[in-house]
Image (spheres, grey):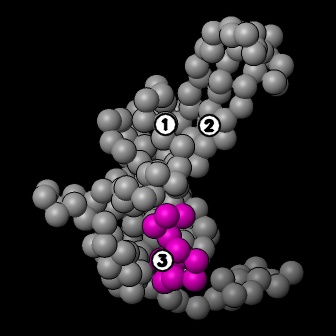
Amino acid sequence: LSKWEEGFRFPKGRYIGHLGEAGEIGPETEALLVENNCDHGEFPDDAINELNDFLAMDVNRSDGEWKIPEEEIKSRRDMRNVRICSIDPATAKDLDDAVHITKIPASKFASEHYEIGVHIADVSYFVRPDTALDKEAKRRATTVYLVQQVIPMLPPILSEQLCSLNPGVDRLAFSCIWKMTLNGDLM
């Protein structure tokens, strides 16, 4: 619709294409996405090529798998020995949120307390500023969750694999960690 003037029974518009039969899930979903300007197409070739070039730099030569570079691991707090749990639903492919809570025994410096952490997958390692992938992610703005499908903000190699906090796999994350007393007061 381009115009629907007050007092007029019919709106004005232009035909841009046929989506399918009304009432069918595919066309109805397509209409919803188009109506809300939700980009649900393929990722542009330049963004994918840039990502592939970047990933090729850190591929483990023995097994062909991407591996976090040792210098990157050294520059961060290593949380691999902490029991961290995803807070995403069991059906999620992109596990990007996680938490941990650890009871810390009393010592001569502090009484018994808890360490609590919230961990978010670090996509910034892969999505560098002003790259084609960064521009595409900004344009998409968010991952869109529908009942029958997910439209990712980032290519699946990132959202479902390299930036997904999957169990037993080393991944990069941003973490916010704080300490609380047993009564819930911040320390």
Residue 49 drawn at (x, y percent)? 33, 82
- Range of the magenta residues? 124-134
Residue 103 drawn at (x, y percent)? 61, 14
As for residue 132 lying within the magenta part, the answer is yes
What amino acid type should be assigned to the residue bearing mark 1? Met
For label 2, the residue is 118
Figure quadrant of the N terminus:
bottom right
Which residue is located at x 30 percent, y 56 percent? 67
For label 3, the residue is 133
Q: Main secondary structure of the magenta part?
A: loop
Residue 41 can be seen in this image: yes
Mark linked to residue 89: none
Q: Secondary structure at mark 3?
A: helix
Of pointers 2 and 3, the one earlier in the residue sequence: 2
For label 1, the residue is 79
Q: Quadrant of residue 130?
A: bottom right
As for residue 57 lying within the magenta part, the answer is no
What amino acid type should be assigned to the residue bearing mark 2? Val
Residue nearest the observer in this picture, 46 or 105:
105
Which residue is located at x 81 percent, y 24 percent? 187
Of pointers 2 and 1, the one earlier in the residue sequence: 1
Residue 90 drawn at (x, y percent)? 41, 33
Q: Is residue 60 left or right of residue 130?
A: left
Closest to the camera, between mark 2 and mark 3, is 2
